[in-house]
Each structure stands twice: as structure tokens, then as C-alpha cells.
């Protein structure tokens, strides 16, 4: 196992042992001279950054999603996951005002404050889905951002994702005009979008030429099993406008991690139903392809799935949820994996 930061699992020397070492005594009994030496200081991953389009931010190539915080993952476990991500060099966290009715934001806000890491973390927030401030109309958009800032215990959001899937009625011009005020007030630094069509993104760029803020980041559900939503039109517009694409559902609700391969019995939870939707021949073929590549490279299936996404043109950094600290290291391994054309072809063919 690679050491990315200070290894807190190694036992601390006793005061007597420390005094003996300082006095030039022999090495502490039981410590083998060839034992690995933990790396002190910043992790290797802290030097791995990619530009998030024209937002001005630079992020680790895997953005930690917080959709499970406050729902399937409690506060203590959520903080442990965030700690593991930061120790590996991660610096970008994505949440939504709709995740657990804002509980996810509360958890992240507590973590940022207790660790003193606000200046080191790129904070991305999706708004539009909270029951108290639904949609992207001017009044609710401002209220949603103010409520998110309060829960997150911060004065700004680095990337504000406008969730058009929750609002098909509000005028795009009104939404961008409101976003302009939020940017000028210093409450938002850059705009992202999810759920907008290619035509709407073109319209947004026309408004930007008139002085409204530009949408520089695009979230679209995308993975090897879910390719239809990132269609040719969206790809063309995102490429032409230089957008950073941050795919959500990178592991298809955890299925591509390969931990669930048998059909579940009895009543299914929401997560169980999401997993069951892929427990078919196509899903099994895809997992076998990930298994084969993972065995060849010595990495888990989740890392291969992340590497497949990072190999796709236009993808900057996928948004990936984690359920436990050990999952974070699997995801981070995907950043260092480079898949060959043959491996990419094998995975894509299996998912057809």
C-alpha cells in the first residue's frame, strides 16, 4: 500500500522509547529495519490538479460527492470519508441543497470549520431541488444560496450548479440575471449546470456575450453503462464552449465498484433498487471486463471505472460518492491508471 500522507495507523513510540532513542540507544525492539517509512508532509496527490474549465479553480481529478452524507452515512463516518479524501490530496467536494434536505451541507460545513480547510477546498453546490426553495426563479434561487451558505458555514460557493431538472418554467435570462447578482456580491465564484439541453447552453452563451456570467462547468450523468445522456449535441456544445465536464453517477450508484453481483431478495431499498436495475447480462459482462482490466493492472473495479471516465474526451473530473474511508483510496487509484486503447475498447464493448 502506498503511503500518501502521515500514517496514523503506526503506533506512536512510548515516552521511554523516545527518551532512549534520543540518548542514542538501540532501535526499539520489534521494529524491523526495513519497515516502510511514512511520508511526512503533504501527500503526493496534493500536486495532482486539473483546471476546472474557465472557473479559475484547480481540482483533484476526482471530486468527492456527498449524496450519501446524512442519508446512508452518518456524521462521524462522513467526516472520516472527508478526512481520507483530504489526506490523499483531494480538494473538491460536491453537494446539493436537496441531499438529505440539507443535512449533507450541514455535515460538510461542520467538517470544513473543524478542520480549518475552507481555503483549501473547492466547494461545489447544486441548487434548485430543496423543498423550501424549489426551482431556479430569482427569489428562490437567492434564498437557496443563502440557506446553503448558512448550512455550509461559509461566505461563498466556488461552483454553483444550476439544476434545470427541477425547473422547466423559469426563464433562463432571469436565472442568469440572478446569478449575476450572486457573483457580483461575492457569494458565488463560478456557474455550473445540470439538466440543460444543448440548445439552452447555446442560449446561455449568447446571454453571456451580453454580460451575464458564463456557465463554465457541466454536470451530466455519465459512465460506461450510462452513455446516452451525454449525447452528441451536448458533447459538441461542451467542447465548443470549453466547459469542464464533471460526470455524476460515475459508478452507477455503486454498481461499477463490483461489490454487488447477486440479485437481492425481499423488499428493496432505494439503493437496492438502483443496484438491481443493472443486475442483468449487460451489467455482468461489464463487471467481468472491469475485473479483467483490474486484475491486469492490480487495481479494483472502481479505479478502472474512474480511469475509463478520465480517458473520455472532455471529462475533467468525475463526481464520485463514497460509503466508507477505504473506498476513497480505491477511487483515488483511478487517477493514476492509464488504460490502453484495447482495454478501453474491451470495456466499452462489454457494456454495449
Image (cartoon, grey):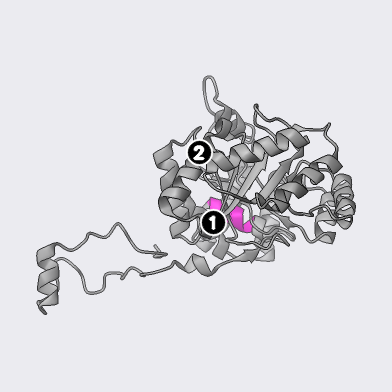
Query: How many residues crowd mark 2 within 10 Å: few (<14), some (14–19), many (20+)?
Result: many
Instruction: Measuring from the top left, give residue 134's x and y in whole percent.
Output: 70, 30
Place residue 50 in its image quadrant.
bottom right
Dividing the image into 4 quarters, which one contains the N terminus? bottom left
Instruction: Measuring from the top left, give residue 43's x and y in whole percent.
Output: 44, 66
Query: How many residues crowd mark 1 within 10 Å: few (<14), some (14–19), many (20+)?
Result: some
State if disc 2 and disc 1 touch (CB < 8 Å).
no
Instruction: Check residue 307 for magenta coloring.
Output: yes
Dot 1 or dot 2, earlier in sequence: 2
Q: Which residues are magenta?
A: 301-308
The residue positioned 54% from the left and 39% from the top of the image is 151
The residue positioned 53% from the left and 61% from the top of the image is 296
**Front residue of 327 and 160:** 160
Instruction: Measuring from the top left, give residue 29's x and y in whole percent.
Output: 12, 68
Image check: 111 left or right of 281? left
Residue identified by numbered label 2: 106
Examine the rendered structure and indicate whether residue 118 appears above or below residue 263. below
**Front residue of 73 and 288:** 73
The count of marks equals 2
Q: Report if residue 56 is visible in the image.
A: yes
The residue positioned 76% from the left and 58% from the top of the image is 243
**Front residue of 134 and 71:** 134
Q: CA distance from mark 1 to mark 2?
A: 16 Å
Q: In the drawing, what numbered circle is on residue 121?
A: 1
Amino acid at each position: 500500500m502506498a503511503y500518501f500522507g502521515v500514517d496514523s495507523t503506526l503506533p506512536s513510540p512510548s515516552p521511554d522509547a523516545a527518551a532512549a532513542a534520543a540518548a542514542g540507544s538501540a532501535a526499539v525492539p520489534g521494529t524491523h529495519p526495513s519497515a516502510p517509512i511514512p511520508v511526512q508532509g503533504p501527500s503526493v496527490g496534493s500536486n495532482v490538479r486539473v483546471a476546472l474549465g474557465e472557473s479559475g479553480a484547480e481540482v483533484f481529478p476526482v471530486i468527492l460527492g456527498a449524496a450519501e452524507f446524512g442519508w446512508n452515512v452518518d456524521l462521524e463516518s462522513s467526516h472520516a470519508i472527508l478526512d481520507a479524501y483530504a489526506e490523499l490530496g483531494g480538494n473538491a467536494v460536491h453537494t446539493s441543497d436537496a441531499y438529505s434536505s440539507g443535512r449533507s451541507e450541514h455535515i460538510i460545513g461542520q467538517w470544513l470549520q473543524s478542520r480549518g480547510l475552507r481555503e483549501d477546498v473547492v466547494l461545489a453546490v447544486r441548487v434548485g431541488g430543496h423543498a423550501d426553495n424549489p426551482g431556479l426563479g430569482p427569489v428562490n434561487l437567492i434564498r437557496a444560496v443563502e440557506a446553503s451558505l448558512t448550512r455550509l458555514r461559509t461566505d461563498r460557493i466556488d461552483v454553483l450548479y444550476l439544476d434545470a431538472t427541477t425547473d422547466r418554467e423559469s426563464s433562463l435570462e432571469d436565472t442568469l440575471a440572478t446569478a449575476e447578482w450572486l457573483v457580483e456580491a461575492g457569494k458565488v465564484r463560478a456557474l455550473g449546470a445540470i439538466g440543460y439541453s444543448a440548445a439552452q447552453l447555446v442560449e446561455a452563451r449568447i446571454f453571456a456575450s451580453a454580460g451575464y456570467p458564463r456557465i463554465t462547468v457541466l454536470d451530466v450523468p455519465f459512465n460506461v453503462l450510462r452513455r446516452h445522456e451525454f449525447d452528441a449535441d451536448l458533447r459538441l456544445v461542451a467542447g465548443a464552449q470549453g466547459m469542464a465536464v464533471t460526470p455524476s453517477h460515475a459508478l452507477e450508484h455503486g454498481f461499477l465498484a463490483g461489490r454487488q453481483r447477486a440479485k437481492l431478495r425481499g423488499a428493496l431499498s432505494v439503493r437496492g433498487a438502483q443496484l438491481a436495475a443493472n443486475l442483468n447480462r449487460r451489467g455482468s459482462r461489464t463487471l467481468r471486463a472491469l475485473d479483467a482490466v483490474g486484475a491486469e493492472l492490480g487495481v479494483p473495479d472502481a479505479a478502472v471505472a474512474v480511469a475509463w471516465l478520465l480517458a473520455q474526451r472532455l471529462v475533467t473530473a468525475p463526481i464520485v460518492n463514497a460509503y466508507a474511508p477505504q473506498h476513497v483510496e480505491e477511487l483515488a487509484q483511478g487517477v493514476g491508471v492509464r488504460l490502453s486503447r484495447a482495454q478501453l475498447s474491451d470495456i466499452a464493448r462489454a457494456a454495449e
